Amino acid sequence: MDIIDTFVVGMMGYAMPQQYTKGIHIRLRARAFVFGHGDTRVAFVSSDICFITQAVKQTVVERLKKIYGPTMYTEENVMLSGTHTHAGPGGYSWHPLYDISTFGFHDQNFEAIVNGIVNAIQMAHKTAVMGQLSYKSGTLMDSNANRSPSAYLANPPEERAQYEHNTDKEFTVLELTGSGQGFPVGTIGWFAVHGTSMNNTNMYISGDNKGYASYLLEKEMKALDKQRGVKYVAAVAQSNEGDVTPNTRGAFCDNGMPCEVAHSTCGGWSEGCHGYGPGKTDFESTKIIGEHQYTAVKTTRDKGGLTPLSGDIRYMHVWIDMENTTVTPEFSGVGKAAKTCVGALGDSFAAGTTDGPGEFNFVQGTNTSANWYWNWLTSKILAAPTTEDISCHAPKPILFMTGRILFPGKWTQGIIPLQVFKVGQFWIVGVPGEFSTMAGRRLRNKVRQAIVNAGGWTSDSHLVIAGLTNSYTHYITTREEYSYQRYEGASTMFGPFTLNAYEMLYTDLASRIVKGLTPPTSAKPENISSAIFYLQPAVTPDQVPSGLKFGDVAKDANPSYKRGDNVEVLFWAGNPRNNLRIEGTFLDVMKKNSDGTWTVVANDGDWDTKYWFDYVANGGNARIQWEIPSTTVPGTYKIVHYGDYKTGNKAIIQYIGSTREFTVA
C-alpha cells in the first residue's frame, strides 16, 4: 500500500533543510505479512520509510484495534520495520529532534504513513491463505561496504578473526507458499545496507535500493497475480546496517584522492569527503544495488532447498527505560554492574558520514572537546549536561543533551519498545535503531545462546535482526567502536553500555518466550504528542496563465521516438499536496490498442518514469519523463497527467491533461 507521496516537505535521513521532496521516482510502499498458527498470529510490516517512530506505531495499533477489536492486533504482536530510505518526506515524529530539519510535524504525511500501514495489514488479513513458511540464507557480495572501517578495527582482533568481512554478507529469505498451489504468495528478504544510494542532493521520492528490489520482485509476479487469485507481496527489509553503506566504490575527495581514513576528511574538513556508489549517478547506483538484492532473493527462492518452518508462534514486547537501565556484570563486559545514560548525541554526530557529510568544523572520530564553542553554545541555549552525564557518556563530547531538552517537548525518546517474534523455529528480533555490523553480530550471538540455554534452539533454527523497528534511538555500536567516536559511536544515545543493555534485555525476552514465561515489568511509554510543532506553510491557491487551464500542455511530446529515448513533457499543474493520490498516480503512460482503446503500460510507481513539480512564472508545472525501455512494444503512445488544484476559496478540483499521440519504433 502507498504510504508517502508528499511534495515540498523536508526529507528524512540526511537532516538537511535544503533537501525537500519535489517529485516521485518510485512510490513508497508498506508491505505487510500476517502469520498465524491456531489462535495466535503476528504481523510484520516493512515500510519504505527512513525509520518507524513511536507516533506511527502507537497510532497504527490504535486504529487496528478500532477495526478488529482490542486483542487481534496489538503493540505486542505487530512489528513495524523501516527500510531506511533517505529519499522520503519526514515530519512524522512526536519527538522534536526529528522534525527540526523538516520544518515541523506534517499531519498529511503522518496520515499517509499510518493509513498506508493500516491498509497494508488489512489487505494481508483479508487475503490470508493456508500455506507453508520456509527460509534459506545465502551470501550477497559487492553490495555493501563499511563506511567506518577504522572504528570496526577497534574491535578485538580475535573477534574480528571470526568473520571474513567487516560487513554482514548474509542474506536471509523467508518464503510464503500457498498450500497446494506450489507458488509463492509473499517473500521477505533481510540484508544489511543503508538506504543512501540516493544522495543528499536528491529531491525525488524513492524507496532507494531496497524499494527498487521489492518493486522488481513484485513486478515479475504481477502478470500472474490475477491468474493465481493472490497478490504477491515482496519486501526487502532492513537489518543491522548501522555502519554499512551501499556506496561500494569508497569515499573520495573532490580532487579524486581517497579521503583521510580515520576522520573521513579532505584537508581537515568533512564536507568534501563523499562515498560513491557503483554507478555513475545516484539513480544508477540505486538500480545496481537494488538489482543485486532482487537477484539474491530470486535466486535463493527459485533454487529451492528452503527449510520449512514448523511449530508454534510466540511473541513478546516490553517498554524499557533505556536512560536508566542497570547492566548486570554478566553482560557489562567490565566485571561489574554498569549503567546506561540520559540520551545525548556527540560532536561527531554533526560531522555526518561519507554518505552525507555534515557542515562547519565537525569531524568524525572526535573523542575530545575540540568543538568547545559548539558544546558551550548548545549547553547554554538548549540544555547543559550534568557532571554525571559527562562521566556517563565519556569519552563522548556531548553536543546535544537530547534527553534533557524539554522544549517544546523531550527531544528524543527514553522509554523504548523491545520486541521478539518466534515463528516456528525462525526468530525475528525487532530493534529500535541502527546496530553496527559487530553490534548486530554480538546481539545475534547472545540471543541465540540464550535460546540454546533455554532449550529452544534446534539444528534448523535461524535468527534475523529487523532494523529500525517500532521507534528510533539512532545508533548502537560496540563499546570499542563507541570509544572511537565516529558518527555511529557519537550517535549511540545511551552511552558506552547501550549494546550491553540491549544484549541483556533481548536475551531475557527470548529466554522467556522459550520457557513460556510472562513478559518482564514494562515501563510506561512517554506520550508527548502535544509537543509537536508546525512551521510548514499551507498550499496557496494555484493559478495558470491567462487563457490556459489546468492540465493544458506546456511542452508537448515529439511526434516520434525510438526505444531508449527519453520523453519529457510539461503540464500546467496544481500543487500535488492538494491530493496525494494514494493508491493512484499522477501520470500514466498509455499504449493505443488496435481497436482504439488504451492500455496503461507505466505510471508514477515505475522505475522508467519520473514526476516533478515546480513553481514557475504565473503557475506551476508538472514535468513528466518516460525513459522508453528497450523492451517497449512499438506502437502509438500518449502520456496522461492527473492532478488537483486549489481555488481561492480553498476548493480542491480535479483535472486531467494529455499529450499528443506519438509513436515509438
Image (cartoon, rainbow, N blue to C red):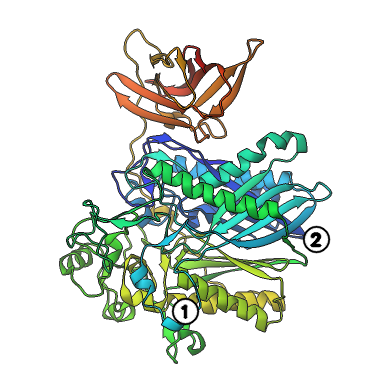
Please state which amino acid type lies under the numbered disc 1.
Ala
Mark whose residue sits in front, 2 or 1: 1
List x then y, in percent, for residue 626.
46, 27
Assign the N terminus to one quadrant of the image. Answer: top right
Q: Is residue 489 above or below residue 585?
A: below
Q: Is residue 138 above or below residue 620?
A: below
572 or 118: nearer the viewer: 572
Q: Which mark is residue 161?
A: 1
652 or 122: nearer the viewer: 122
Q: Which mark is residue 261?
A: none
Secondary structure beneath label 1: loop
- Residue drawn at the location 47% of the way across and 21% of the way down: 562
Residue furthest top as drawn: 547
Q: Is residue 13 above or below residue 145?
A: above
Residue furthest left as drawn: 373
List x then y, in percent, for residue 241.
46, 62
Is 232 displayed left or right of 562 in the figure?
right
Residue 496 appears anywhere in the view: no
Image quadrant in which you'd find residue 411: bottom left
List x then y, in percent, for residue 339.
41, 82
Q: Is residue 123 above or below residue 497?
A: above
Q: Which residue is mark 2?
A: 38
- Residue drawn at the location 27% of the way across and 73% of the way down: 385
Secondary structure beneath label 2: loop
Q: Cα distance, mark 2 to mark 1?
A: 44 Å
Please state which amino acid type lies under the numbered disc 2.
Gly
- Residue drawn at the location 61% of the way across and 80% of the way down: 449
Residue 602 appears anywhere in the view: yes
